Amino acid sequence: MKSMSVQCALGLFAVALSGAALAADVKPADQIEIRQGGYTFMSWNMGKIKANLEGDFDAKQVAAAANVIAAIANSGMGALYGPGTDKDIGDVHTNVKPEFFQKMPEVGKLAGNFVAAADQLAKVAATGDAGAVKTAFGDVGKSCKACHDQFRAKD
Amino acid sequence: MKSMSVQCALGLFAVALSGAALAADVKPADQIEIRQGGYTFMSWNMGKIKANLEGDFDAKQVAAAANVIAAIANSGMGALYGPGTDKDIGDVHTNVKPEFFQKMPEVGKLAGNFVAAADQLAKVAATGDAGAVKTAFGDVGKSCKACHDQFRAKD
C-alpha cells in the first residue's frame, strides 16, 4: 500500500507537470512570481479557516477558502518550477532549496499528499462540519510543513 | 431587470466584504500583496485557457484553470481593499486608483459581473465544451478589462 500511494503521488505530480509545455512561454522570473502568488493567496485562505475555527464558524466563508486552496493545489503548479527557477533572478527572490529540483520523487510524494489533503478539506468544508474541517485543516497544514521543512530555505 | 442585476451585484460584493472583520488582522501591505498574488495567479490560469483555445484543447487542464479563477473570484477579495490599501506602502506598490474606494456601487457592479462570468466559465469548462469555454472565457476577459479600464492605473 505504501508503494502504491507513492506511485499515486508521483502520478499526481506528473499530472501537475504535464502543463509544462504550455508554461514554456512563461519566463522563469514570472514562474517564480506566479507560484509565490499562489502560495500567498493560499496562506491567506488558510488564515481565514484558522480564524473561523478559533472564533465564529462561518461555513460559507470556510467552504470558499477551502475551494481556493484545493483549486490552486490542483492547478498544475509543478509547471512553475521550470528550468532556471532554482535561484534568484534579478530582484526576484526564491526560497526554494536547490535539493527540490534534485529530489523529484520525494517532491512528488509531498505534492500528492498536499493535493489529497486539500481535496479532503474542500470536501468536508462543503458539508459545514466544523469538527471535520478542523481535522482536515490540520492535515493540510502538516502537508505544507512537510515540504517547507525539507525544501524551503529560511528567509 | 437592470436595477435588479445591479442590486445582485452589490449583494455579491457585500458578501465579498463580509470577511472584512476577519481580515482586520491582515496588515494593509499584506492585503495589497495578497490581492496581487491572487490576480497574478488568476492571470496565469487565464493564459493557460487562452493557450488551450489557440492550440490543443486539454479539457482537464482548462477545467482546473477555470476552477482556480472561480474559487479566487469567490474568495471575498473585497476584504483585501481595507483602509490604508489605497496607496503604496513602503516598497509595496499598488496600481489601484483612488477612485476605486470612492465608487463602491460601481465596484460592486463590476465585481458581481466578474464573479458571475467566472462561475459560468467554471461551469462550462467542467463539460469540456471548447466552444462554450471560448464564449465564457471572452466574457471573463471583458469583466476583468471593465474594472482595469476604470480603476487600474498604468504601471
Image (cartoon, coloured by chain):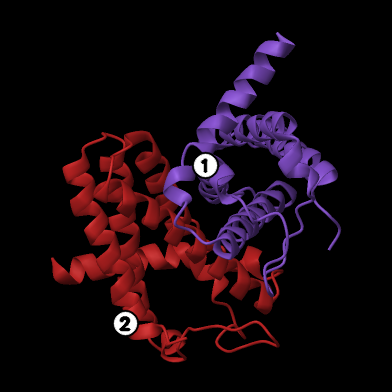
Chain colours: A red, B purple
Q: The residue under label 1 is which amino acid type?
A: Gly
Q: Nearer the viewer, residue B37 or A13?
A: B37
Q: Nearer the viewer, residue B116 or B124?
A: B116
- Badge 2 sits on which subunit? A
- Badge 1 sits on which subunit? B
Q: Nearer the viewer, residue A96 or A74?
A: A96
Compared to residue A25, the image places residue A86 above or below, namely below
**Which type of secondary structure does the marked residue at label 2 adopt?**
helix
**Which type of secondary structure does the marked residue at label 1 adopt?**
loop
Compared to residue B101, the image places residue A25 above or below, namely below
Mark 2 Cα within 10 Å, few/some/many (few <14, many 20+)?
A: few
Q: Residue furthest top?
A: B1
Q: Residue furthest left?
A: A1
Residue B145 position within the rendered picture, expressed as x and y whole percent measured from the top left: 79, 43
**Residue that badge 2 annotates:** A149
Q: Is residue B144 visible?
A: no
**Residue that badge 1 annotates:** B76
Residue B140 position within the rendered picture, expressed as x and y whole percent measured from the top left: 70, 38
Compared to residue A19, the image places residue A126 above or below, namely above
Alpha carbon separation for disc pair 2 and 1: 30 Å
Eye-nearest disc, 2 or 1: 1
Q: The residue under label 2 is which amino acid type?
A: Asp
* Left or right: residue B100 compared with residue A154: right
Residue beneath the point at 51% across and 44% down? B67
